[in-house]
Amino acid sequence: MWIGFKTLIVASILVTLTYASYRDIKYRDIPEVTWVPAIITSVIINILSGKYDPLHTALSMFPVLIVFVMSLLGMIGGADFLALLMIALAHPQFLVFPISLLTLLYSLLIPLGLMMYYALCNTLLYKPLLKKVRCKEGRKAYLIFFGRPMNVKEMLEKKFTYPLTIPVGKGEFICRPSFSDDDEEEERIKERIKGAIAKGEIQSDEEIWVTPGLPHVVFFFIGYVLALLTPQHYIMTLLTH
């Protein structure tokens, strides 16, 4: 019977993550109610099956706490926290590693790979452009790992692309490592850049440094599938022999 319940839990999580990933890719916005059916289904089944023992549940929730703190700091969105909370509540027990921890670790592979790609391109291909940037506030190192140069006009027209260098005068910028989770704040920054173009502080065909708004829920979806496929029984055998 438990196998059938477990299949139902996994199916509800996969369906939810599929829909949430679609919303994240297309709109970068996921209604909070999206997570409710799968969470309720998982919690009810796990309570009735007696799966919430204190130690394993606490360990499963620890990665969720990390993501929650990151969301409070504006490093990621609230949907990322809710996605991992759903996974942790669905899989409170584990053999070696919590499913929530594996999901989080796997989900970081794509952003880390992108950082390495940026660092390589920026140091080899865009070094002259990087040298021209004068940061009145912040550090130029942010740009190496988190951004790439883009035409100002293109950036203003492109969806889910945010400036890391914000003009504050002729040839000077605020250099930041990421963008705000506040859409209104980001819109104000783009209006500020348009004002800088009007004042002649920056040209529309000039290069500034930008970063993409990544669909992190998609990475959690991939991470969750990989976590389910991780052979924990085999790992346990290796560790105990």
Image (tube, grey):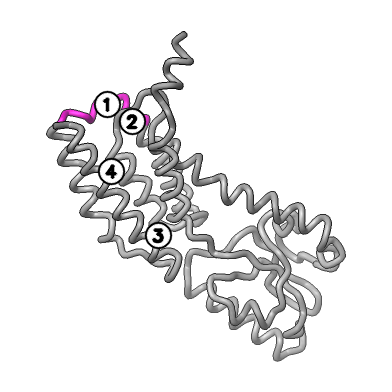
Q: Nearer the viewer, residue 163 or 238?
A: 238
Q: Which residues are magenta?
A: 49-59
* Residue shown at 36% from the left, 50% from the top: 83
Disc with the residue nearer the chain's start (1 vs 4): 4
Distance from the alpha carbon under mark 3 to that under mark 2: 27 Å
In the rendered image, the residue lying farthest to the bottom is: 198
Q: Which residue is mark 4?
A: 10
207 sits left or right of 231 in the view: right
Q: Which residue is labeled 3 in the image?
A: 21
- Between tags 1 and 4, which lies in front? 4
At 21% from the left edge and 29% from the top edge, which residue is drawn? 51
Tag 1: amino acid: Pro
* Mark 1 to mark 2 CA distance (whole Å): 6 Å
Name the side, left or right, on which 109 lies relative to 62: right
Q: How crowded is the residue under tag 4: few (<14 C-alpha within 10 Å), some, or many (20+)? A: some
Please give the residue where the numbered disc 1 appears in the rendered image. 54
Report the amino acid beneath label 4.
Val
User: Residue 74 at x, y = what percent?
Assistant: 49, 57
Q: Is residue 57 magenta?
A: yes
From the top left corner, tell me how far across and down residue 117 is, in percent.
70, 53
